[in-house]
Every structure is written in structure tokens, then in C-alpha cells.
Image (tube, rainbow, N blue to C red):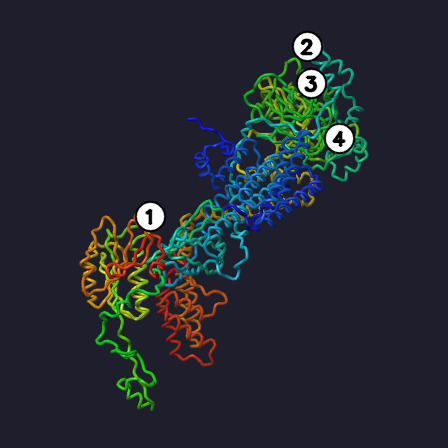
Amino acid sequence: MTRVRSIHIYLYLFMLLTTAAVAALDWTHGLFAKNFLLSLLWGTGFGCSLFCGYSYAAKPSPLLKQWSDATAIIGLTVFLFILLSGDLIRSLITFGLLIQIAQNLVLNRVRQVYFALAIAFVVMLFGASISTSGWFLLLIVIFTQAATFMLVALQGERLKQLSHAQAVDSTEGRSQYPASVTLLTTAIITIAAGLYLVLPRIPAANIGAMYSRSDHYYSDKKWEKDAERYEDDEISGENVAEDEQEQGILDDGDAEDNGLGNGDSGDGSSEKYGALEDNKEGESERESGSGEQFSYKGFNDTFDIKTPRCEGRPANEIIMHVQSDQPVYLRAKIFDSFDGRSWQNTREKSVKRLLDQRMYEFFPGNPEKTVRQHITAAVKLPNSIVMAARPFQLDFPGSVIAIDGHSMPEAPQSIRRGTSYTAKSVIEWAEDHPGGGKEDINGLSDYLRLPEKLDPRIPELALDIANNKTKIEAAFALESHLRNEYEYSLTSIFTSQGVTPLASFLFEERSGHCEYFASALAILLRTQGIPARLVTGYSATNLNPLTGYYEVRALDAHAWVEAYFENTGWVTMEPTPFYILPKPAKVRTTAQAIAEYLDNLERAEKILSSGNVSHNPWLIIKALGKTIRLVLYKAIIWLLLAWNQSKFLIAIIVVLAGSLLAGWYIFRNQIYDAISYLRIHCRPTGSHHGRVIQCYLEIEKVMGRSGLQRESGQTVEEYVEEIMARFSNAHPMRRLSELFARARYGQERMSPEFSSEAKTLFTTIFKQWAGKSWRKPF
Amino acid sequence: MTQQLSFDQPIRFFNPAFMARIRKHIKLRNILLLFSFILFLIAWNRGIALLYGMFTLVVSILIVGYIFPYLSLKGVSVSRKHPLQVTEGEPLMITCHLRNARQTKRCMLELIDSIPCANGDMKAPLCFIPRLKTEKVIKFEVVCDWRGVHTLGPLRLRSSYPLGIHRVESMLPGTMSQVVVYPSVFPIDRMGFEDSSHADVSGVEAATFHGNSGEVMGLREYRSGDCMRHIHWPVSARQNELIIKEYETINNTDICIVLDLNRTDNVGQGKHSTLEYSVKIAASIAQYGLTRGHRVSLVGHGVEPVYLPPGTGLHYLTNILEILAYVQADGNIPYEQTMRDAAARTGASGILVVFENLHPGRKKMDHRLLNMPGTRRIIVEFDSQSFITGEKAATPGGRYERNGITVYRVGRDDDLVEVFNQ
């Protein structure tokens, strides 16, 4: 078969191609209007071209051939045009889709359909590789269904052309789709869902390079000049970093101008995460500089733990997607000095570094185990290039970056939405705590400095907890103490002036947000002579199992602690109970990952809604699942209790119930037949009329169960004739049907003789037919 | 030896044999397996969960492709009807009645019959049923090219629903039936029987005028000139007018068709064998004879002896055709003996239709037998060489006289209508 004639093939091809085109448009970042119009445009293109192809499939038109050639030339032009902008993959995808429109105009052969399928598959792969939205799974389902139905239509077409005969029925002449769409869809999706849930997620192999991608190229002439000068001086042995520090590489004013600053609410708001309404306050600020950029004061060089406000985005909005083999804490800033209220980065000397073909290596060598993080910004972010500790390599779409005194990189401009970059870190584990990186012992003194006016109760508390413990044990004990004895709250309650926030948090309020927890732990550790520093960044620990990306929400902008131990180097510590420290990767099923994801969502929802009713559909689904689980759990508990009390009895009941069920399933027809027999033979005295009728009806049921049902609309006479035509020994059935007709439709009353005859006929037919299966002809 | 390249020759990048081998493996099942493998590899390498989803969907399609064909055949029963006799070369109308006993409709069913008397693809005609809800009737025609008694079926029900990646087939018991394919008959306008009507005829007396014979054929009103001896007096008395008896003419002849069923005498292959030609000619001569009131009998010696006593009337043709439908050249008895047997059965008044097959492996026919006095013969002479070599006969077929005997010469691919109507 080479020709395509069925309209179903064209319809499903349209669905397939349109889905692929929609998938290729990057919907992740919510350019709904633009993408909707583009989808509409592609859909129209595919629809019109396929309609032309179908209309002229039998007799190809030379005009359409010309149009097809013209479209192909347009495709080539567009390909070259997009290629000039540097995006090879997008240009290829667009070229492929335009070529497919050209093909559709003259589509009438099977190989062209397969070509279209291949194009759509490649486009879909591309879409799946860039999409970070869980809704993309819906597109995948639609795509596979469309592809399946198209292949089914092709198979039907092939068989139709091989067929030597046509069916003679009322639908003759109409093109019938040779499949049950509902049944097929249900079966495929059910099996796929089952497989998907039990499929173990093996850690990614990450063979081959990850690429960085952005519509914007991050460069700055001044930075590049500084970097070149720094490299020259480095060769000549001079240190320009200090000069730069003096000059102030990036003063506040410049930062604001460049969009680097995080803004300053300045109103001392009591909440870390303002609701969306609260953001109205900052509208003027956004207009003046930061726009829709997400900002967190913990990313500034100095920040007050009382007002670590996040701005620009609702707390629950996804601001970043991270693809990694394991959950990670992404570091943005490191602070070493605390004055009791504010943290400061005293090692502010920053140097500029040129990227070598977008690549930068933080230290030389080739570490064996690295953790790769592919980070994609979903909104405009501050210029900190966040990475997990201990950074080793960076692939960033720019020419230059700045590295501060704690080896934290920064971009020349704010990280724009859609920018993706890849980083590699060397993570070492100490007692399930991530970390890594050793320092010169002389440089650790900064991390032991305590605030001048430190409440004396704080060292006492630390001493109580860390009594007679090694340093690392003491550190973990302090961490546990904070996690277990204090409560996480987004509401900042330390508004009164003159109160040291840390002491108030530790001894009075005993609840607060993460900056309090982190600051408290850092100071407690320092009182015990353990070098500690506060780190701000993002917690990328909530893996969306549908997309495979860790979702970082505004709420996940976070502060934690790194403590230094002689043997292990820097170790990440998490004192805030709400957050869960990243754990090493392990193989899980999708079902487990979904459960964990929903747990995380629920926790976040609880914190954010503070008792309000949540309308998150995921959580509603989860609540339903929980209810079912609870009922099952209760049932199992009840069974277990009963089992403990009388095992033997339960076992017998279970075996009996199972046997009964199995027996009923295997012998159900025989059982029903026996009931029919008993109905006739054990019927109490009734009218002879009714008995005759019942004899026939019961025997019809018996025959129906053996596969000879009377069709709807078929008269009793037709039914009996059909049986007679198939089985020559069915004469008693005819006689019984005659009696039935006389009883039901006749005027006369049935005599006892007729009743007796009907019963005899019933018995004869019953013995002949009951228990036999005519349903399965083979 | 150097091969010169020509611009007219298409450039082949791959060896055609290699391409054919590759093409053999390009099946939807393999493509889906390859797709799922690629998807899994990419998903695993990059940890792209969406591709895991796509992978499970493709695997699910494969699973469905393997399970659904089994389910699709459940609960489907088929019955078949067709005429019990058909003539060679004519279509046999077959009607199949499909029923689905289950609630869910069945899709993409293929019903395959087995029709050994057909040629080519039609030996196993395929009927595609896109959907079967409760019942459906399928009709198709098959041209029966081979005479004989053939067993149709059993019907096979097949399904490769939905994608054709896996095929399940079931035989439907009780769907075997027989059909008799009569040999085809060509029209003959005139043969040599009447030419020798001066000779003996069968019957007790010679007819002196029309309507005079030994067998009463019917009654009619008296017409002037009718013999008074033939008046049916009881009927005339009842009807009060003269009614006369009509008698069957007796100038008919016993025609004995002597089939050559000797294994070694049958040359040629398939439809172009001397036996097939003999059968076709025998059937046509029988029809011709019976149409004209002659008595026709059939003699042949295969593994089973074939003998059909002389009979008249067109209804007798059916008996002859039924015998001719299954005769095969499987005997060992020499044809001369068959002829002697036939001559003995027919007697001096009959006409023998004999088939002379002159091929190198066979002895010359006994001319003494052929010239046996008192027995008239019509000889059908085959140009065996043309049947053996498969080429058209060098000498065109036709009718001629040999020693006063009518001989029809027949070669391969000769138009029998033309040969027998010259």
C-alpha cells in the first residue's frame, strides 16, 4: 500500500503535528498570548495544508505542487534567518515544521505520513527536553494518542486495501474508523500510568555536555577590561583586587542602574514573604529599577535578619527550575560577620574573570564525582549565579563574571527569565550533611567572631547542649536542638526597638523564620569555637516527578549555616525545621516521588496559608488519596487485630471467601442455570398462564448465557428461527415459543396440560443446552 | 572486466540486497521498540521525567498491541453459506455471517477463507471487518478455476488490532464445507453424429414418420393426416374429441465418451493438461448430445473405474458433470482396454468419443480397434508436443476426416469453440 485515502489519517496527522508544534513553543515561561497566537498559526497552517492534501490526494494538482515548493523555499529562508540569530535548534525545528506544511500539501503516500510522524517525534523530543512544566505531560499523552490512532488508521487502510470483500450492512459506504477510541485510549493511558508510577528513577548518567542557553548574552565592557587587567597583573604578580575593593566595584547606585540590586522596601515590614497584595507597596520600586525581578535581601552584601524580605514575586511562584541528580542547596551569598542584627560579607573583594568559551573553572583538577546542576530561571533573578557547594565548573552564557571573596560568582546583569546555565560542584558528605572545601586555618578567624553585645544566655545555652561532646557532635546537637525545640514561622515578631533579635528568638518567642534559625546556629557554633558562616541561596529540594526538575519557589529563598571542621571542611547545617537538608540521591519509584512532592507542597501551603483554605488541585487530589489510604489503613489494622485474636478463623474465612468468589466466577453460568431450573421446578402453585410464560423466559436466559442471546429488536419467532437454522435438534424450543406466544398474546387461558407441557419442554431444552457454551466458537 | 558508468543508470548508494535485508526489519514493532529504547536512553541520561512519561506511553502502546488481538477475537462466531455447485470459471458467491456475543465491539477483524479451487490470492480471500458491534454480513465472490469437489475452509479469524504489530489467528471449527465445481462447457453447434444417421440407430423400430416411435411422449389434438392407430381412444371418449398419442423419435444415438485416465497419458500442467482439455471437451460433447436427445454414457479407468450408464435429457448432464468434476488421471489401465470396454458396453450402434494422445512415450493407438467394424468413432486428437513444451501447437487445431472418421485435432491454447465448430 502506498496511497493514503482515509480522512482519519489526515485528521490524526493534524492533531499530531499541531500538538508537536505547540510542544515546541516554550510555554514554560507563560507567554500565553504570544504562544497561543503562534499555536493558532501553526494549527491553521497544518489544517489548511492537510485539507488541500486530502482534497487532491486522489488526483494530485500541479498548482499544489508549486505551492508546496514555494512553502519549502519559505521554510529554508526562515531557517537561515533564525540561524543568523544563533539558535540552531530552534531554526531546525521551525524548518522541519515548515517543510512538513509543504509536504502536507501533496501528502497522499504512506511514506509521507511516516515522515510527518518522524518530524513530529523529533519536535516533541525537543519540546520535552526544554519544558519544565508538568502540563507538558498532557501534550505528550495527546501526541502519543494521536500517533497511535493515526497508525491504527494506516493499518486499517492497509487491511482495507488487502480485503477482497466488503461488509454488507447499514453503514456500508461510510468510512469507519477501525478502532474503539475510548477503549484504546483508556487502556493505553491506564497501562502507561501504572508503568510510570512503578518505574524506578535511576540517577541520570549525564553523558555528554549540558549547554547553557539564553536569549541574552551576559557581557560588560568594563568588567571585561577589568578582567583582562586582572589577568595581566596576576601574571606580573600585582594584586588588583584590593584596588577594586577600594574603588567599590559595584556600588549601590550602579547596582540599581544595572538592575542588580534587590530593592529595599525600607518600611521594615514584619513579614518575610509578603502576599501578592503586599507587593503593591513595591510597585514604585519595581518601576524605578527592578521591574518584575525577584529579590531577596539575603542576596545583598549586608542584610538585617529582622527584615529579610523577599519581593517581586508571590511566595508560591516558581522562580527557578533546577535539574540535578540530587536535591541541592544553591548558594548565592556567604556572610561571615554578624553584629547582633545584621550580617555582612567582609571579604567583599571581588575580581572579574573572563569566561573561556562560556566556561569557568573554580579550581584546577578533574574531580571524580561531581554533581551537575542545570539551572533555568523562570523569572528575572538577581545577578548572583547560584551553585551548590563546592563549586568546580560553570558553563554560563556570557563573557565575564565576578568572583567574590567566598568564590561566589556573579553575572554582569540580572539573570533574565529563560536563562539556563550548568554548574558542577564537588559535594562531599559528612554524616548525611553535604559540604566540602577546606580552607587555610588562618583564614578561619573571621568565622569565629561574635557580636560585641552578645546576650550571655546564648553561650550558656550552647554550652549546655554541647557539653562533653566533640566539635562535630556538638554542632549536630545544636542543629537538632534548634530543629526540635523551635518553631518555624514566616511572621516576624521582633519589631520593638532595643531588643536583640537573636536572644528574643532563642529565649522568648522560640519561633521565627530561617534567618533567625541560621543566625542562632552560627552564633551558637561560634561560641563553641566552631567556625561558622551564614549562607543565603535557594533550597532546591522539591522535585516535581512529572517534569524531573526541582522547583524553586520564592518561598525557597533561604538562609542556612556552614560549619567548618578540621577533618571534613565546610559542612552544610540546617537548623530550620521547615527545610529538609539535601540527601544523597537514591533510586525511587515515580509514585514515591509524587508522594514526596505532594508532601512538600502541602507543607509549603500550610506555612503560606496559615490556616486558610487551600484550593491547590494537587492538594485536593492528595487529600482524596489520603482519605482512601486512611480507610485502607484502618481496614488493614482491623484485620491485623482480628488476625491476632483468631488467626485460624480469619484464615478459614479468607480461604472460603476466595474459594466462593473463584467458584462463582468459574461456575457462574451453571449457578444461574441451576437457579433458573429451581425457579421452574420449585415454583409454588401459581397460575398456569404465568408458568408457561416463565418457562420460556427462563429458557431464553439459559440460552443467552450459553451465548445465544436474543438481540434487541429481534422477535421471539425470529430468534427461534435463528436457533432452528443453526441447530437442527431445537424443535422443543419452537413448541415452547408457540406456547409462550399463546400465553402472552393470545386470549385463551392456559390449561394445566399446557403448563405441564411447557414444564416438560423446559426440562428437555434445559438438559440439552444448560451449561454448554456456544459463545466461544473456538 | 571494467564496468562503464552511464548517466542513464541510476546511482545506487547501497547494495540492493543489503537494502532488502534492512527493509525486512523495518516494521512498526521494531520502530516502536527503537523509539522506546531511545526515549529511555535520553530520559535516563538527562533525567528528563517527561521523556520517562513518553517512554511508558510507547511501551504501553506496545503492550496494548500485543494484548488486544487476543481480546478482539473473543466472542466472535462466524457462519458461512454458499451454493453447493458451481461451474468452472464462474464466480462462487460466499456469504459470511459474523456475530459478536460480547458487549464491547470488536475491531479490525480479518476473516480468511480457504478456497482451493480459486487461483492466486483468491485461494485465501481476506475480508476486513473494521468494526463488529453485534452482527455483520460479508459477501464476496470467488472465481472457481479448478473443477473438482473442493473442501472450503476452515475459516480463519485473525486480528492484529490495533497496530498490526502482533497477529493472532484462530481457526473456526465447523466451517468446512464442500463445493462441486463442474467443468466448464463450451457450445458446439454441430458434430458428426447426424452425418452417420444412415447407419444403425438404437431402438426397436425405425421411425417412418415424425412422431412415430416406441415411447409415448405426450397427447395432442388430432390433426388431419395423423395415423388412426395412434388415437388414444379412452381419452378421446372422455373429452369427446379425437386425441392422438405422440411418440418420441427413436433416431437417437448412444454416445459413449471414453475418458483417458491413464496416468502416463496425461501430459501438460495444470489447466493446460490433456486431461483438463479432455474433461472440458467431454462435458461439452455430453451437453451437445443430451440437448439433441442422444443417450450419453461415460467410461474411464482411473484408480476408481468411472462408468455412467447411458442417459438422456438435460437433467442427466448434471450426473455427467458431477463425474467429470472429480475424475483424475490416476489410473494404470491402458486406454485401449478402456476403449474395448466402452465398445463392448455401447454396442455396434453407438458412437465412441475417444481421445488420442500422441506423445512419444505412448504406443500408437491400436488402429484395428479404431477400425473395428460396426463401431463408429469420433476422435479427439491432442497435439501432445504443444502440451509438453508449453508452446502453442505448430499445426492449428481443427476438424478433419481420417479414414472416414471425424477427427478433432486440439493443441495447447487452441480455441475449443473454434475447433469444434469449424
The residue carrying pointer 3 sits among few (fewer than 14), some (14 to 19) or many (20 or more) residues within 10 Å by Cα, namely many
Element type where label 3 sits in the image = strand
Specify whether disc 2 shares its chain with disc 4: yes
**Callout 2 amino acid:** Ile
Check residue B6 in the rendering and tell me which mark sits there, or answer none: none
Label 4 to label 3, Cα distance in Å?
33 Å
Question: Is residue B179 at all visible to an observer of this figure?
Answer: no
User: Is A609 rendered above or below residue A6?
Assistant: above
Q: Between residues B245 and A212, which one lies in front from this camera angle?
A: B245
User: Is A184 rendered above or below residue B53?
Assistant: below
Specify whether disc 3 shares its chain with disc 1: no
Label 2 to label 1, Cα distance in Å?
98 Å
Mark nearest the camera among 1 and 4 is 1
Element type where label 4 sits in the image = loop
Element type where label 2 sits in the image = helix
Q: Is residue A433 left or right of residue A665?
A: right
**Chain letter for mark 4:** A
Q: Mark 3 points at which residue?
A: A353
Quadrant (top left, top right, bottom left, bottom right) of the C terminus of chain A: bottom left
Mark nearest the camera among 3 and 1 is 1
Q: Which residue is drawn at 48% across and 38% down?
A: B33
Q: CB under 8 Å between callouts 2 and 4?
A: no
Q: Residue at x 31, y 70 (%)?
A: B292
Q: Name the residue under label 1.
A: B390
**Callout 3 amino acid:** Arg
**Callout 4 amino acid:** Thr
Q: Name the residue under label 4.
A: A307
Q: Where is residue B159 in the image (x, y as percent from the top left)?
A: 45, 50
Q: CB under 8 Å between callouts 3 and 1?
A: no
**Chain letter for mark 1:** B
